[in-house]
Amino acid sequence: MDLLEYQGKQLFARHGLRVSSGKAVQTVAGAVEAAAEIGYPVVVKAQVLIGGRGKAGGVKLADDEHSLREHAGNILGMDIKGHTVRTVWIEHASDIASEYYASILLDRSAKKPLLMFSIEGGVDIEEVAEKTPEKLIRHHIDPLAGLSREEALRVAADGKADEDIREGVADALVALYEVWLQEDATLAEINPLIVTPEREVKALDSKVSLDGNALYRHPENQSLSDAENEDPLERRAKEEGVQYVKLDGDIGILGNGAGLVMSTLDVVAQAGGSPANFLDAGGGSNAETIKQAVDLILANKAVKAVLFNIFGGITRCDEVAEGLIAAFGEIKPTVPFVVRLDGTNDEAGRRLLAEAALPNVHPAKTMNEAAEKVVALAAGRPLEGSA
Ligand code: GDP
Ligand code: MN
């Protein structure tokens, strides 16, 4: 779960990392009001889940109300790499002496958190890593011992941070690790971590991703999920408790069990198709869940055909068939369905489907056959030898 800059900064502040206070607003009038409170000069920053806002014109300084109105007006509604700006963050502008970089992420191969630090911040850090790798300090943190202040000071020294602010940098790194650890983040990045002319070290930007699976441990963070940027179908699925991920293709997918659904995505892709979603109806899917799932899959208007791939274990194929029949009764889908039922009560399920004679529902015996059929149907090709 990715956080907007200002949300990340709020987490930073909670752990003692220095940030400028500010206000998130959605209108020019709101921006003017916020700036009057905060005091000019202010910086107006587009709040979108994508980097490079500065280069795209989404970060502007304003010395007075006149230029604030102009910038806020331009940035609100702006498109930044496909993300529409609906919120801007207004904070008191900082004076900058140096721009550093700091981040912590999980290095899966080392099985440890990785702290990265560089005095070449404010720019694309990939470029620093590529052209001058010696300027990017990489330090693995022992997850049991944590990050000590001495260790953080050493990282600041290794990175050749100005001597007079190494203490401040170390404090920031220790606080950043606390954010990463205590908030169950998978990434906590500051670019730039600035040094002001008054020799203060503070976070001018934030990029934080929280582990969505750990969110239950942080009820106070649950409201941070950015509802306005979240896909509306995924949001609805979450509310309904359905395991659904929206994808870019046109073939709706339903299976039971995450492994089976993932294999189904692969098989459909192999057959030349492009899945529109991942949907795991779960073990023990009953008629009601199936109906709800069909509704969700078809709410995506890109879907041209749907593949049901059910392997009956705890899930009974006859129940799935009943769910599908009930769904057809209520929703009356206009796109073709391919249904593969295998396992517990599969014969009964197929019999129910045959008796119901649902329009445009095609049985398949194997996964490969099902995938080929659904890809053909989505492309508008007739099925060979089928009614
Ligand atoms: P990004 O482009 O999405 O990474 O957005 P940032 O928040 O990192 O801002 C981009 C750049 O704008 C920074 O590297 C700074 O150079 C500049 N900037 C942002 N805030 C301020 C500020 O308060 N004062 C000054 N002088 N420059 C700022
Ligand atoms: Mn940045």
Image: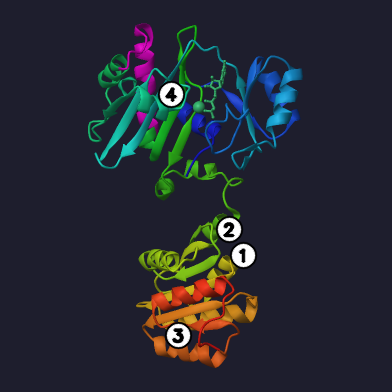
For the residues carrying marks 4 and 1, which lies nearer the camera in this image?
Answer: 1
Q: Disc 3 or 2, which lies upstream in sequence?
A: 2
Query: Looking at the image, is 280 positioned above or below residue 193?
Result: below
125 is within the stretch colored magenta: no
Residue at the disc numbered 1: 299
> What is the chief secondary structure element of the magenta stretch?
helix
What is the spatial separation of the Cα atoms under label 3 and label 2, in whole angstroms?
A: 28 Å
Q: Nearer the viewer, residue 93 or 384?
A: 384
What is the spatial separation of the Cα atoms under label 2 and label 4, in whole angstroms?
A: 37 Å
The picture quadrant where one finds residue 64 is top right
Q: Which element carries disc 2, helix, strand or loop? A: helix
What is the spatial separation of the Cα atoms under label 4 and label 1, in whole angstroms?
A: 44 Å
For the residues carrying marks 4 and 3, which lies nearer the camera in this image?
Answer: 3
Q: Which element carries disc 4, helix, strand or loop? A: loop
Question: Percent position (x, y) of residue 281?
Answer: 46, 69
Residue at the disc numbered 4: 16
Q: Disc 3 or 1, which lies upstream in sequence?
A: 1
Q: Kindly identify the residue that appears in the image at 26 percent across and 17 percent down.
A: 154
Residue at the disc numbered 2: 233
Query: Looking at the image, is 272 positioned above or below residue 73?
Result: below
Residue at the disc numbered 3: 318
Count neighbours of disc 2 (C-alpha within 10 A) and say few if under 14, some if 14 to 19, many if 20 or more. Answer: some
Q: Amino acid at mark 4?
A: Gly
Q: Is residue 329 left or right of residue 167?
A: right
Count neighbours of disc 1 (C-alpha within 10 A) and say few if under 14, some if 14 to 19, many if 20 or more. Answer: few
The picture quadrant where one finds residue 368 is bottom left
Span shown in magenta: 159-179
